Image (cartoon, coloured by chain):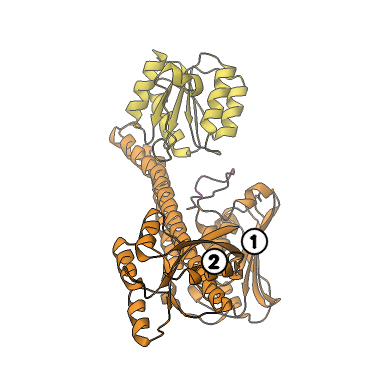
Amino acid sequence: MGGKTILLVDDDVDFLEQTALRLRADGFVVVTAEGQARGEEAVSSGTPFDLAVLDLMMEHPDSGFVLGHRVRRARPGTPVLLVTGVTGETGLEFDAATAEERRWVPADAVLPMPIRYEQLQAEIDRLLG
Amino acid sequence: MDSLRVLVVDDEAGIRMAVERALRVFVVKVPDFGMEFGLAIEQAASGEDALETIRKAAPDILLLDYKMPGISGLDLMDRLNVDGVDVVTIVITAYASLETAVAATKRGAFDFLAKPFAPDELKSVMFKAAKHIVVQREAKRLAAERKHVRFELLSVVAHEMKAPTAAIENYLRMMQDRVLGEEVTAYDHPIERAIIRLDGMRKLVNDLLDITRIESGRKTRTVVDLDVREVAAACLEGARELGLPRNITVDLAAGGPVPLKAARGEIELILNNLLSNAVKYNRDAGRVDVGVEARDGAVVLTIADTGIGMTPEECGRLFGEFVRIKNDKPRSIEGSGLGLSIVQRLAHLYGGEATVASTPDVGTTFTVRLPIGA
């Protein structure tokens, strides 16, 4: 797994910092972007990455969706992991467990907040496996 | 136009017809609420008929004859009360005795009409009944709305607590797992960040308490004769201290006393919220200029900063709850997102308003108008 690059986009600076630190400790190269706008810049800049971890709600309620589509267009086949604290609470329930869902949800997996690093690690291993 | 359903219950066909004729084209206007109603008249010749009609669909207003063979007016009211039917009942009676009135009132009658009655008397009673219905409906709607707003605030608050809780937990786990090694000093930054997030949570709790106090604690307000300039001068001290490390100047424009009848704590809350924003979102070596003056029948507070400013779109949603405008300020700024909402709620409490004018990269000016003697 070592040496692979992960794009991490979230508007919570502490989540970025903690997750980046742990991923780096696990041997990943991590590119962080705070918020949707910076995330879009990172995606369009051409910086290569092997997987994207995107927060759903940032500047807009659907920031992660927009970014997910950008990633899919800019780098087809790159796995996208969507992290969200809103499913269930807002009635905005969705998952990316089936192929049908993955057709409209621009993600290969959806993880609910708050998320333990071990969960994230397991999902990343699975998607990059 | 909405219409109110009126059921006329009387064993005398003449009365029923007279009511129908008088009310058929009558429009009830309730100008206080900007509403107009037409009346849809239905008839029932006996208590039994009426009961059947009402059980199918309850009318808004019941014009009920007191004395009928079979089920009497009083009997009918008893049964409706048992069934929990919510209807405004006007009792028609030829025997305008005290006894009748007491018996009907006990059963919840809204008003009386003495036979024989003129069309104008009937219309005046109908107007009163319609107004009563409108007021009741409005009260119900407001109660429901308040409940909804409260629930929404609660769920957003719960959500607002989740992110800092997770951040703090994760920093603690990092330490627990010795992610940065055995040396304690390696964790200085995570500890500092955790404290900043805890500080943010404490602010959120304090601000929520302020909001709850504004919403419900009106009884405990002590309104006194204040000199707002003097209050502002006192608040300025705190802001100056806050601005000192970043060399930010905070000044109050000169002038005489500015009297207002107000609760000191509330005026302080307005000023402190605006002043701490003006310092927090300022540039290093920037300025905060505070004005306090009486103008056009109001005390006008202005707090102008030389900070990062905002776009009109950002200004537009600024006074909502949990709005934090994203910017490139240092991460040590942890706001609850409730400060300006508190300012606006307080301004409204005084019959006034808080407004904002801003230019990106130039600065922001907040103005709070508090009418004198409102």
At horizontal 37% and vertical 21% (from top left) the residue drawn is A123
Residue closer to the observer: A52 or B342? B342
**Residue to which mark 2 is pinned:** B20
Depth check, mark 2 against mark 1: the one in front is 2
Tag 2, which secondary structure?
helix
Residue position for label 1: B355
- Colour chain B appears in: orange
**Badge 2 or badge 1: first in the primary sequence:** 2
Tag 1 subunit: B
Give the residue displayed 48% in from the left and 38% down from the top. A13
Question: Which residue in the rendered view is the most extreme toward the bottom?
Answer: B98
Q: Quadrant of the N terminus of chain B?
A: bottom right
Residue B150 position within the rendered picture, expressed as x and y whole percent measured from the top left: 43, 56
- Magenta stretch, main secondary structure, is loop
Whether residue B213 sits left or right of residue B254 in the image: it is left
Figure disc tally: 2
- Look at the image and tell me whether residue B200 can be seen: no
* Quadrant of res A92: top left
Q: Is residue B272 left or right of residue B154?
A: right
Q: Position of residue B8 (x, y in %)?
A: 46, 66
User: Start and end of the magenta stretch?
Assistant: B325-335
> Which one of the lettered chains is coloured yellow?
A
Q: Quadrant of residue B167?
A: top left
- CA–CA distance between discs 2 and 1? 54 Å
Subunit ID for the residue under disc 2: B
- The numbered mark at residue B80 is none
Residue A38: quadrant of the picture: top right
Q: Residues within 10 Å of mark 2 (few under 14, many from 20)?
A: many
Q: Amino acid at mark 1?
A: Thr
Q: Nearer the viewer, residue A22 or B318?
A: B318
Residue B329, magenta (yes or no): yes
